[in-house]
């Protein structure tokens, strides 16, 4: 092999290594953002349901709220395991989401069962859309995205489906009869999107 050819092969090899390194760095950063924000989101969801249960726990919808909270705790537990596994720094906003989530849950519950369920519809709609976006992003992460992220995709898909069940539960329990339903749900959706954006970055 000539000296020129060997140099060309060496340059091609270095270029390939650099490309792979860049790709791996981007994937790692993507996973860190996803796990960070999903952990924050599931934590916030547990606090919202805890707030609702504090007000409505002894009413006819108490068992329904208890069931949804238990599912959210399972989701949160999964991301609490993924945080150290992937060496992800949790969002610094957890103390705020702790207070804000409980206040949102309790506040809407104080307006009545319908408002609490409207809150559920708004939050779960936002989370469902968020998880859908993450699934598409994972699949699109290279030609083998669906394969290398198969486990996480299955986890997020399962959680998304359960969140959408919560959405349906909210509708079945008269969410749309809440006072100013459209205004209430739209405000909460905007808040959820803002919390998602911040939790990914801070």
Image (tube, rainbow, N blue to C red):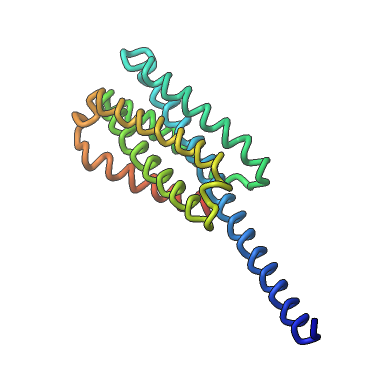
On the image, the x and y values in percent for residue 159 come to 46, 34
Residue for point 46% across, 33% down:
158
Residue for point 50% across, 50% down:
138
Residue 190 in the image: above or below residue 53: below
* Quarter of image, res 82: top right
Along the horizontal axis of the image, is 17 left or right of 37?
right
Residue 202 visible somewhere in the drawing? no
* Quarter of image, res 116: top left
Residue 75 in the image: above or below residue 201: above
Residue 182 visible somewhere in the drawing? yes
On the image, the x and y values in percent for residue 94 come to 55, 41
Q: Nearer the viewer, residue 134 or 173?
A: 134
On the image, the x and y values in percent for residue 37 come to 51, 46
Residue for point 53% across, 27% down:
74
Q: Nearer the viewer, residue 96 or 7?
A: 7
* Quarter of image, res 189: top left
């Amino acid at each position: 092999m000539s000296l020129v050819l060997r140099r060309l092969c060496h340059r091609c090899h270095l270029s390939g290594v650099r490309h792979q390194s860049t790709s791996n760095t981007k994937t790692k950063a993507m996973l860190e953002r996803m796990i960070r924000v999903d952990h924050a989101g599931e934590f916030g969801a547990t606090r919202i349901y805890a707030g609702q249960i504090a007000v409505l726990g002894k009413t006819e919808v108490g068992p329904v709220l208890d069931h949804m909270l238990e599912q959210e705790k399972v989701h949160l537990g999964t991301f609490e395991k993924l945080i150290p596994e992937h060496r992800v720094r949790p969002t610094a906003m957890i103390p705020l989401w702790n207070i804000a989530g409980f206040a949102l849950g309790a506040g809407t519950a104080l307006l009545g069962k319908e408002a609490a369920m409207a809150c559920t519809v708004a939050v779960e709609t936002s989370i469902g859309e968020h998880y859908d976006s993450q699934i598409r992003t994972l699949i699109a992460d290279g030609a083998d995205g669906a394969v290398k992220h198969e486990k996480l995709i299955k986890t997020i898909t399962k959680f998304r489906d359960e969140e959408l069940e919560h959405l349906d539960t909210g509708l079945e329990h008269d969410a749309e009869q809440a006072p100013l339903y459209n205004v209430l749900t739209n405000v909460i959706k905007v808040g959820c999107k803002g919390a998602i954006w911040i939790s990914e970055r801070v």
